[in-house]
Image: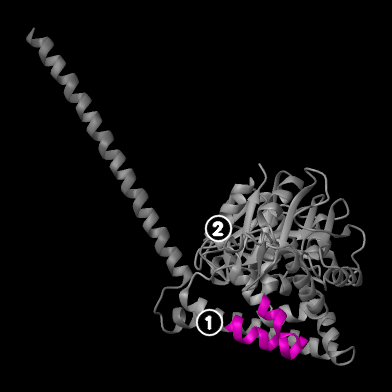
Amino acid sequence: MSTTEQADTSVDNNTAADSSQKTHFGFEEVRVEDKAERVASVFHSVAGKYDLMNDLMSGGVHRLWKRFTIEVSGVRPGHKVLDIAGGTGDLAYKFSTLVGDTGQVVLSDINSSMLNVGRDRLIDRGVNNNVQYAQLDAQFLPFANDTFDCVTIAFGLRNVTDKDLALRSILRVLKPGGRLLVLEFSKPQNSLLEKVYDQYSFRLLPLMGKLITNDADSYRYLAESIRMHPDQETLKSMMAEAGFANTEFYNLTGGVVALHKGIKP
Amino acid sequence: MNATVDPSISAAITASIESVINTALRYDPASLQKIAAINDVLAIASTTPALTLYCHGTRDGVRIMSHCEAPTVTHLSGTPLALISLLKKPTTLANSGVELAGSVGLLQRWQVILNELDIDWEDAISSVLGDIAGPVAAKTILGGLNWSKHQGDEQIRLFKEYITEELKVTPSKTELNIFNDAVSDIKMDAERLQARFFQLLNTQTKNTGTSDKTNNKDAV
């Protein structure tokens, strides 16, 4: 899960007289300016037990999804990598071992609680020479053009308010030939799996959240925000429209999760 | 790339294999050092099931992947049994059932490492059982494995002798060689006979041709 705090920029035409923009917070419609705070509170709440809940909710499978993401990244020694919505540093740690002493990894997140947990974890694991930390908004990346060889965003794009803006911002900071990897929950490709997944998401996840973190609402938001996220083909089109070339995706675990890849031309 | 296997499953397979190998390699620092120097990618493709694994060395051991963006230097393909037997007897690819494409040098580097692998199993077992029970258990386990292997080889040898010498169901190697030699002799004799026949035929043809010319000359 990621922690960007912007609202979708969709405008509610029925309330044109009221010019405030509305966005989705899970299944709920909220004002754009309210969503940021709502998302922030979710991730401030879950930061402490984020890794434990990831393991419990996915049965440890999230580690396999991230492992595949690392393989597709093609990152090698000397590369510069930006991990957006990096949360507690799973991907950043692996990248730091791959880029070596001549490379650089920037672990970033908009939520300070998540970033602090990630920084503490990496320091505890002895990573301190090629990783930097940055609190930032994916829509307005504070880096120069053509900086990074690879940008990853794992389980974070669905929380971004303006995904197009974020994709264009990422395109700008990538070097020509650099790649973007978006790992995100998506639409299962099998109808039976989809039914099972729905039951699991909307019944079991909030219950687990309540039992372990005493916060059922945050994990209900997780399930709802997944359903509001674009499906595989839609996201692929969005990346192409943003300017990425050779866009493609891989369905993982029957499409429960998808890894999208795009190259900056 | 493994197009038909869900990446989650292939990632689970590679993670398991990598973990086992690198755990064992921790007890052979010399091999670990050699492996760290191998940056080129070796692809190992199993035909059934269709699965390709990519590997190269890192300072922490072998990295095994189900998807690789880097170019592959050497590509091996074959059935799982053929590929595993190549690991057991890494001497030649001839009649091994394994096809190779690309650099042989990279494969040879891996074969040298496999041949010189020296995992300190006693240390590995001691790390689990302790410094007192560990060496005793290691000696017992390794001794048992060596005995089993010896017994297995012996049983195969005895079985071969039984079916050739006792049951006489199949000829022995010596009898087969004698038979093959006899067949080769017959074949060579037949070829010689054929050559002599054609030689005689050519000679007769020439004589007939010369005789015709003489008769024609006399007629003129």
Q: Which residue was labeled with disc 2?
A: A234
Q: Which residue was labeled with disc 1?
A: A196
Q: What percent of the width, then of the height, locates residue A253?
A: 57, 72
Main secondary structure found in the magenta portion: helix
The segment highlighted magenta reads A200-221
Find numbered disc 1 in the image and state the secondary structure of the residue it sits on.
Answer: helix
Q: Tell me if residue A216 is in the magenta stretch.
A: yes
- Between circles 2 and 1, the one closer to the viewer is 2
> As rendered, which of B107 and A217 lies closer to the eye?
A217
* Residue at the (39%, 79%) spot, across then down: B169
Find numbered disc 2 in the image and state the secondary structure of the residue it sits on.
Answer: helix
Check disc 2 and give the amino acid type.
Answer: Thr
**A12 relative position to A55: left or right:** left
Residue A177 visible? The answer is: yes
* Residue at the (29%, 44%) spot, across then down: B193
Chain that bears disc 2? A
Depicted B84 relative to depicted A74: above or below: below
Q: Distance between the residues labelled 2 and 1?
A: 23 Å
> As rendered, which of A123 and A262 lies closer to the eye?
A262
Q: Quadrant of residue A166?
A: bottom right
Judged from this view, the residue extending furthest toward the front is A17
**Other-residue count near label 2 (Cα within 10 Å), few / some / many at <14 / 14–19 / ≥20:** few
Q: In which quarter of the image is the C terminus of chain B?
A: top left
